[in-house]
Image (spheres, rainbow, N blue to C red):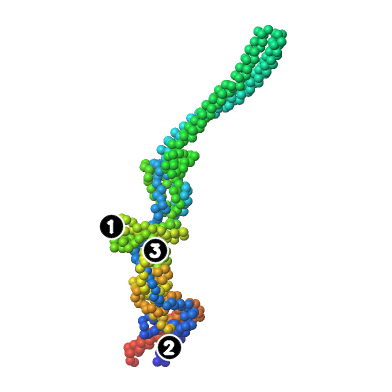
């Protein structure tokens, strides 16, 4: 019996210290769950300051009428391009892959094409022939230039000689005329002198006419024309080849291959070709490039809403799953065609996306504002709203030191604010910072603490002592059971022993 009491006393010593440590509060009782309201949390003023709780007053203000429609982001028509095989051929090199950013004109792939190879060979043959003709024409031009210079030298000498002959004949004519007047020479001799002067002047006139120079100049002009024609033929010898390259939007390499370049700057989205692939037809897709620095957001209007939307109306674009993020723009296009399948009309707005955080294909909510029609409503900051899966939105309303979670029905989003349709009244004070801490505490329903930086000693000590206490209980129970079983067995042995 004394041994049993010793085992019981050991069990009590192990259990009570562990239980005492496990119940140690650590930080005091700063959060209190209010028994009268489900999930409400009471926080004293000092703890509110330490936790950084902030509140805002529910206010009533004028709100524009708005229409929210589903939307998605799409690339603008001029900001996307399909790169295809320009001609039949085989891909020798792929220079980019999906996800790469490319600039306009950047090489994307290298292609070998039989068609372009044939055009290039023909162009080279024509170029060789035109080059030979040009060289012959240039040689003819050089000869004509030399001939002109020679004729100019000869004509200049002839003019100089003719001028001397004319001067000599003129002097003799004047002398003979004077002698004739004096009767010193017969008239027949004077007439011969006069005839010689006329012949000298005729030779001078002939020399000054420069007929050989004119002929040489004509020959020079003919040679120059031949050179010009030869040069044009040389230039046109590759015109067909170059025109074909321009039509294909590609550039030729020295080895006869073709380099396919990017028609726009952007990001390579898809690659539909493999290295070494051969195509017998032009137009096979290779790459798709999208420039998402500007995007269009496309909303879909029902038939009844179409008449209330016009070009120029302001819109807000809200990203699904990110209610705090939105963008502003204006409607720049309303389609005139109704989709036969959905019976909806597309409305479009353009957004700048310099950081390219928005991606084509993302879903959004397009809110179309009607600034001409106003109404009043209650608004709160969007930071006050906690969205939960499979539950209505939640806010915490302050009532003194108590903060009560209240489910609300939301309406329009107005930038950083949101309309509250049901659940709140004007003048209510809602928490805008620290909502997550209050919500976590409201779920616990006890007096535990959620401070930003809890002290290390209480949490550090509570867990080891709890583990030690629990282990001691288990060991004590095990030993007590062993001892009780031993005593029970001894009693059975005594009862079953034969009397002597």
Residue 146 percent coordinates (x, y): 59, 25
Residue pointed to by mark 3: 314
Height in image: 42 above or below 116?
below
In the foreground, 185 or 330: 185
**Could you classify mark 3 by the number of other residues whose Cα lies within 10 Å: few (under 14), some (14-19), or many (20 or more)?**
some
Query: Is residue 460 something one can see in this rendering?
Result: no
Element type where label 1 sits in the image: loop
Q: Does 15 appear above or below 293?
A: below
For the point 38% across and 78% down, the residue is 426
Tell us which disc is closer to us: 1 or 2.
1
Residue in the picture at 38% in, 48% down: 285
Q: Earlier in the sequence, mark 1 or mark 3?
A: 3
- Identify the secondary structure beneath mark 3: strand
Picture residue at 46% right of the left edge, 36% below the top: 238
- Residue hosting label 1: 341
Q: CA distance from mark 1 to mark 3?
A: 28 Å
| Picture disc at residue 12 | 2
Quadrant where the C terminus is found in the figure: bottom left
Picture layout, residue 246 above or below residue 498: above
Q: Secondary structure at mark 2?
A: helix
Image depth: mark 3 or mark 2 in front: 3
């Amino acid at each position: 019996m004394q041994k049993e009491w010793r085992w019981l006393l050991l069990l009590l010593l192990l259990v009570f210290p562990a239980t005492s440590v496990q119940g140690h509060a650590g930080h005091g009782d700063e959060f209190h769950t209010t028994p009268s309201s489900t999930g409400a949390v009471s926080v004293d003023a000092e703890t509110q300051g330490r936790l950084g709780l902030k509140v805002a007053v529910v206010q009533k203000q004028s709100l524009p009428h708005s229409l929210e429609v589903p939307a998605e982001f799409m690339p603008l028509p001029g900001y996307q391009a399909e790169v295809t095989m320009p001609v039949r051929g085989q891909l020798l090199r792929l220079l980019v892959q999906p996800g790469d950013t490319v600039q306009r004109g950047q090489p994307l792939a290298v292609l070998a094409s039989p068609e372009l190879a044939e055009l290039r060979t023909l162009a080279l043959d024509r170029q060789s022939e035109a080059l030979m003709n040009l060289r012959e024409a240039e040689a003819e031009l050089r000869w004509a230039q030399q001939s002109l210079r020679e004729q100019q030298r000869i004509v200049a000498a002839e003019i100089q000689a003719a001028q001397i002959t004319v001067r000599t004949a003129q002097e003799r004519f004047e002398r003979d005329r004077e002698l004739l007047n004096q009767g010193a020479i017969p008239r027949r001799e004077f007439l011969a002198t006069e005839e010689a002067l006329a012949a000298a002047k005729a030779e001078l006139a002939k020399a000054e006419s420069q007929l050989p120079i004119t002929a040489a100049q004509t020959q020079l002009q003919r040679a120059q024309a031949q050179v010009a024609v030869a040069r044009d033929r040389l230039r046109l010898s590759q015109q067909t080849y170059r025109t074909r390259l321009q039509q294909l939007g590609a550039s030729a390499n020295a080895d006869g291959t073709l380099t396919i370049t990017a028609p726009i700057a952007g990001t390579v989205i898809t690659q539909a070709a493999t290295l070494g692939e051969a195509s017998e037809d032009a137009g096979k897709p290779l790459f798709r490039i999208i420039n998402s620095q500007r995007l269009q957001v496309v909303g879909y209007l029902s038939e009844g809403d179409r008449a209330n939307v016009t070009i120029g109306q302001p819109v807000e674009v809200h990203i699904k799953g990110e209610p705090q993020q939105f963008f502003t723009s204006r409607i720049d296009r309303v389609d005139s065609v109704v989709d036969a399948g959905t019976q909806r009309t597309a409305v479009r707005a353009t957004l700048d996306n310099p950081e390219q955080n928005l991606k084509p294909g993302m879903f959004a909510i397009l809110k179309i504002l009607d600034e001409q029609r106003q109404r009043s409503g209650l608004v709160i900051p969007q930071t006050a709203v906690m969205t939960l899966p499979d539950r209505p939105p939640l806010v915490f309303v302050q009532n003194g030191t108590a903060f009560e979670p209240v489910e609300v029905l939301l309406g329009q989003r107005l930038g950083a604010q949101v309309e509250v349709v049901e659940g709140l009244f004007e003048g209510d004070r809602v928490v805008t910072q620290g909502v997550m801490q209050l919500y976590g505490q409201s779920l616990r329903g006890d007096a535990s603490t959620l401070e930003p930086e809890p002290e290390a000693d209480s949490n550090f000590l509570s867990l080891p002592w709890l583990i030690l206490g629990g282990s001691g209980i288990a060991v004590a129970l095990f030993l007590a059971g062993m001892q009780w079983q031993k005593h029970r067995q001894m009693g059975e042995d005594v009862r079953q022993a034969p009397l002597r």
